[in-house]
Amino acid sequence: MKYLIPIFFLFIQLSGCSEQPTPAKPNPFEGLWKLQIMEQKNSETGLWQEWRDGMQGYLLYDATGTMAVHLTMKGYQDTNLRFPNFIDTIPDEALKHLTKSYVYFAKYTVNESEGYVEHARISHSNPGDWNKAVRRKYTLTGDTLILQPYESENANLKLTWVRSKD
């Protein structure tokens, strides 16, 4: 009898140890990414070329399945234009400048077996793209993430992101 109680406590401790949760697999997408280059495939040569005069931006994936992207033309912030927010008296020049900024927020899921990440948009700087889901083929190597749109109108684009140290 005097051995029964210690054996019982040992059994409880051992059974508790075997049921510890398995650590979650780290999410390699999670974090802040800075755009290194946005390229367009030349339909005549098949070569990748920097899109327009270059783009800049950030991509953020969080641990809860939410993401955000902000793309602008290079040097977007280097303007003397200043205008108020949320009023209807913005000069035409400022409105044209605003069109050089592209933003959306989405819920994301990664399909590792098929090699794509899906962005189920919840808002977008283009009202016509609200609540639309888009897929991006991905290649993830170390601190470099390459995304390529699936949709035909953008399938000739490639965005190369590097993990931000900012």
Image (cartoon, helix red, strand yellow):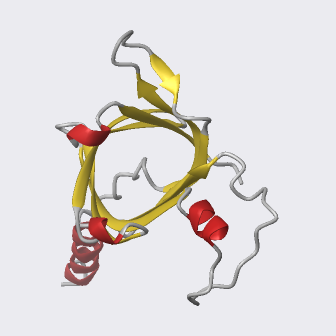
Q: Quadrant of the C terminus?
A: bottom right
Q: Nearer the viewer, residue 19 or 117?
A: 117
Towards the viewer: 51 or 159: 51
Residue 116 image offset from top left, x and y in percent: 25, 42
Asked where in the image residue 119 lies, by quadrant, the reply is bottom left
In the rendered image, residue 56, in percent from the top left (x then y), is placed at 61, 47
Q: Residue at x 40, y 19 (%)?
A: 42
- Front one among 101 and 158: 101
Residue at image x 35%, y 12%?
44
Callout count: 0
Q: On the rendered structure, is 46 left or right of 11?
A: right
Q: Residue at x 36, y 13 (%)?
A: 46
Q: Is residue 158 visible?
A: yes
Identify which residue, 39 or 66, lies in the foreground. Answer: 39
Residue 4, horizontal then vertical, whole percent:
19, 80
Work out which quarter of the rendered image holds the N terminus and state it: bottom left
Residue placed farthest to the bottom in the image?
87
**Farthest-out residue, front:** 92
Does residue 15 appear left or right of residue 75 in this picture?
A: left
Residue 91 locus on image (x, y percent): 65, 75
Farthest right residue in view: 80
Asked if 82 appears above or below 112 in the picture, the reply is below
In this view, 53 is above or below 165: above
**54 sits to left or right of 123:** right
Residue 62 appears in view: no
